[in-house]
Image (spheres, rainbow, N blue to C red):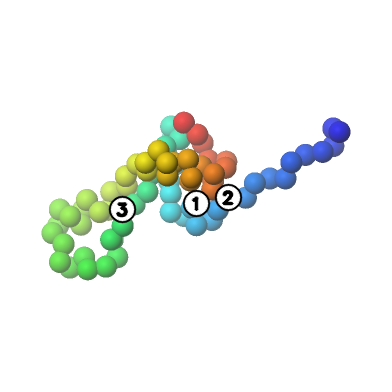
Amino acid sequence: MAGVTKPKLKTHKGAKRRFHVTGTGKIMHRKGGISHLRVRMSKRAKSKISDKIMAHDAMQDRVHKLMPYAKRS
């Protein structure tokens, strides 16, 4: 059975575009609310929205399933 190999797993393209994996394997994502009603927001609120935040543990597990070849911590 030396010639039998498992098929490659596909990366979820939507997850690849939405999430960023750090060098230590943690998942980062952008906050919501960035594209609507920004005129009303203060300058500080707009700058805070642009930051990436670390995903919660449950979300990290789900994203790693969607991106099987992303580095794990």
Which secondary structure, mark 1?
helix
| Disc with the residue nearer the chain's start (3 vs 1) | 1
Q: Residue at x 43, y 54 (%)?
A: 18
Q: Which residue is mark 1?
A: 16
Q: Residue at x 58, y 50 (%)?
A: 11
Can you give x and y, in whole percent of width and height, for residue 67 in the image? 54, 46
Can the viewer see residue 71? yes
Mark drawn on residue 37 = none
Position of 59 relative to 73 (above/below) = below
* 3D distance between C-alphas at marks 3 and 2: 22 Å
Q: Decide: marks 2, 1 in contact (CB < 8 A)? A: yes
Can you give x and y, in whole percent of width and height, for residue 39 in the image? 17, 68
The amino acid beneath tag 1 is Lys
Mark drawn on residue 11 = 2
Can the viewer see residue 27? no
Side of 42 where 1 appears, left or right? right
Q: Which residue is mark 3?
A: 31
Can you give x and y, in whole percent of width and height, for residue 20 in the image? 43, 46
